[in-house]
Image: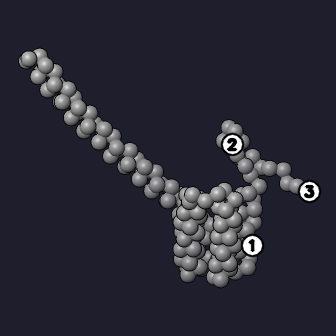
């Protein structure tokens, strides 16, 4: 009888230790995910700041641009994460992009909007290969 109760006590102790270990792992994973999100957000902000510098935006334009980009990214993520068909998502994203361009044109000059469009077209002209390296697609003639 003592052997059985000893085995139960050891198993209970083992179960408690495993619970704490798994809980600690979850906390660590959550912290790592948050850290990655923060780094991604910092990288995104640096990219936007760099773009704003290249476009020679004024302080008010820069503020409006940052807000517009943040709202666009949030809306695009919501569309991508939705349970809608792929075609519908594509249509919604296209409409969102058109709306975003219109919004940008309210506070940016035509030249600045054109530079942004050129940058996006250049970005669309590239794709990733299977090895993950970016390669420029041949332009149709």
Q: Nearer the viewer, residue 49 or 123?
A: 123
Q: State the count of labels.
A: 3
Where residue 16 appears, as percent x and y from the top left, is 21, 35
- In the picture as drawn, the residue positioned furthest to the right comes out as 141
Image quadrant in which you'd find residue 112: bottom right
Label 3 residue SS: loop
Q: Earlier in the sequence, mark 2 or mark 3?
A: 2
The structure residue drawn at horizontal position 74% and vertical position 73%, both measured from the top left corner, is: 114
Q: Which residue is mark 2?
A: 133
Q: How is the image coloured?
A: one colour
Label 2 residue SS: loop
The structure residue drawn at horizontal position 71% and vertical position 63%, both measured from the top left corner, is: 120
For the C terminus, give its image quadrant.
bottom right
Badge 1, how many Cα within 10 Å: few under 14, some, many 20+? Answer: few
Q: Which residue is mark 3?
A: 141
Between the C-alphas of marks 1 and 2, the distance is: 28 Å
Q: Earlier in the sequence, mark 3 or mark 1?
A: 1
The structure residue drawn at horizontal position 72% and vertical position 42%, both measured from the top left corner, is: 129
The structure residue drawn at horizontal position 41% and vertical position 53%, both measured from the top left corner, is: 34
Q: Is residue 55 visible?
A: no
* Mark in the foreground, 2 or 3: 3
For the N terminus, give its image quadrant.
top left
Badge 3, how many Cα within 10 Å: few under 14, some, many 20+? Answer: few
Q: Is residue 110 visible?
A: yes
- In the picture as drawn, the residue positioned furthest to the left comes out as 2
Left or right, residue 7 beside residue 99:
left
Where residue 26 appears, as percent x and y from the top left, is 34, 44
Q: Which residue is mark 1?
A: 114
Contact, mark 3 vs mark 1 (Cβ under 8 Å): no
Q: Earlier in the sequence, mark 1 or mark 2?
A: 1
Where residue 12 appears, as percent x and y from the top left, is 18, 30
């Amino acid at each position: 009888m003592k052997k059985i109760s000893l085995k139960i006590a050891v198993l209970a102790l083992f179960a408690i230790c495993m619970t704490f270990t798994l809980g600690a792992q979850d906390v660590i994973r959550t912290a790592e995910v948050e850290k990655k999100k923060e780094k991604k957000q910092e990288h995104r902000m640096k990219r936007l700041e760099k773009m704003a510098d290249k476009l020679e935006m004024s302080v008010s334009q820069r503020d409006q641009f940052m807000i517009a980009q943040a709202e666009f990214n949030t809306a695009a993520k919501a569309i991508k994460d939705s349970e809608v068909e792929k075609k519908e998502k594509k249509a919604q994203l296209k409409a969102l992009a058109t709306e975003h361009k219109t919004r940008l044109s309210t506070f940016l000059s035509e030249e600045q909007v054109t530079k942004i469009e050129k940058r996006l077209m250049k970005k669309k002209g590239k794709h990733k290969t299977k090895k993950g390296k970016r390669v420029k697609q041949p332009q149709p003639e």
